[in-house]
Amino acid sequence: MQAHIADLADFVVASPTSYHAAASIAARLSAAGFTRLDETAEWDTATGKRFVVRHGAVIAWIAPETLGAGSGARIVGTHTDSPAFKVKPGDHLTSAGWTQLGVEVYGGPLLNSWLDRDLGIAGRIVTRDGAEHLVKTGPVCRIPQLAIHLDRQVNEGLKLDKQQHLQPVLSLLPGGGLMDHLADVADIEREDIAFHDLYTFDTQRPEVIGLRDEFLASARLDNLACTHAALVAMEQAEVGDHVAVFAAFDHEEVGSATTSGAAGPILEDVLLRIAAGYGLGVDATRAWLRRSACVSADTGHVVHPNYPNHHDPVVRPLPNKGPLVKINAQQRYATDAVGTAIWLDACEKAEVPTQPFVSNNAVPCGSTIGPITATRLGITTVDVGVGLLSMHSARELVGVEDPEYLAKACAAFWA
């Protein structure tokens, strides 16, 4: 468990954005014997250990030489992005003698949790020749909160205007130079930069905390904790009767409707090309997909001790009691009885505990890639994940045992 948590912490540090996460995953898969395929080229074969990278998403799979009778695909889906602030065009903006970074909100962060934190800037820069360059700075900016002396009512309810109050400070005037700095970081010429996809990130390292070291406090646990668990399981997986698939999508926090998101075609593209490699026609491919199953692994909520009334009065999941199986009558999660049976079988084989999650009827829940995948492909899908406190905060909290539990359950699902 300690080794898994240490590895998760290193993965989080190496993955300040979805693009960095995809690069980290790709490097680890290559080291584990996977071969990267080019989506723009024809594939001679899709069997064996393979993967593709599309922007901030990765699809990896292990395919046997021949399909067994009645076999399908066993998919674990996660996402690589997390709530943050995305950098707007232009080097900077100015106000009252300060140079500031122009940003807009990405996803649904707990805005107040980003105040007074030492933030870095990371992402990708695309040059005019179409080449992508990953960049990552140290702590260079901060969103300063107004002192209580200047807002005596702040503790009665903080209100943040997304345009006026959330622009980080970079330096004092005369300002500018952010893109010059990032060009130096990427070792490219400033005039060669076409555009960028850049985000702020919390530079504080993950830490194991608690009286008995029970918890991991970290940025981006939603959803790097589940992505890392599935990656660890895939690294250790062997060829079996089914095609084992690890799908780490991008853009879940903003709806998934992109070329690299779960609502886009990336997973279907890969599955259809794998099926074509086996010589399956349209009818046989659709039958193969109907024999498939997907575990959508995303973080969920454990009961909050300061806000117990926001949770279901009976179902009370806790940290270190196993990953959640997430259930919702409105199908915000894709879980049904069939998918739950698949998940319980995997947990039993892995000898790990699991616990249900349902929302308080008066508190609507979020959603995941699960319903999107089930809708796009017609695949039986079950929504699961490790439980957090402070989800969508700049710094979240997870039990130290749950990420490894999830990795073992994913491995059993693929076995």
Image: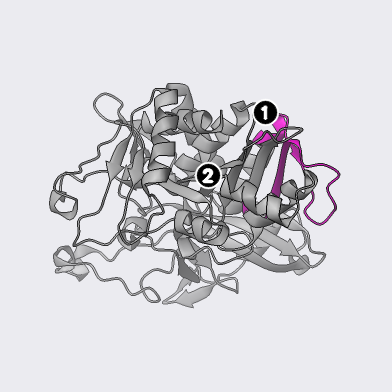
Q: How is the image coloured?
A: one colour
Q: Is residue 401 visible?
A: yes
| Residue 65 counted in the magenta span | no
Residue 62, horizontal then vertical, whole percent:
68, 35
Q: Which residue does the numbered mark 1 point to in the structure image? A: 239
Which badge, 2 or 1, is on the more N-terminal residue? 1
CA distance separating discs 2 and 1? 17 Å
- Element carrying mark 2: strand
**Magenta residues (range):** 28-57
In the picture, measured across the screen, residue 190 lies left or right of residue 13, that is: right
Amino acid bearing label 1: Val
The quarter holding residue 364 reads bottom left
Q: Which residue does the numbered mark 2 point to in the structure image? A: 293
Residue 68, horizontal then vertical, whole percent:
68, 33
Amino acid bearing label 2: Ala
Considering only vertical position in the picture, is 398 above or below 162?
A: above
Structural crowding at the residue carrying mark 2, measured as other residues with C-alpha within 10 Å and reported as few (<14), some (14–19) or many (≥20): many
Q: Residue at x 56, y 70 (%)?
A: 175
Residue 312, horizontal then vertical, whole percent:
18, 50
Residue 316, horizontal then vertical, whole percent:
20, 42
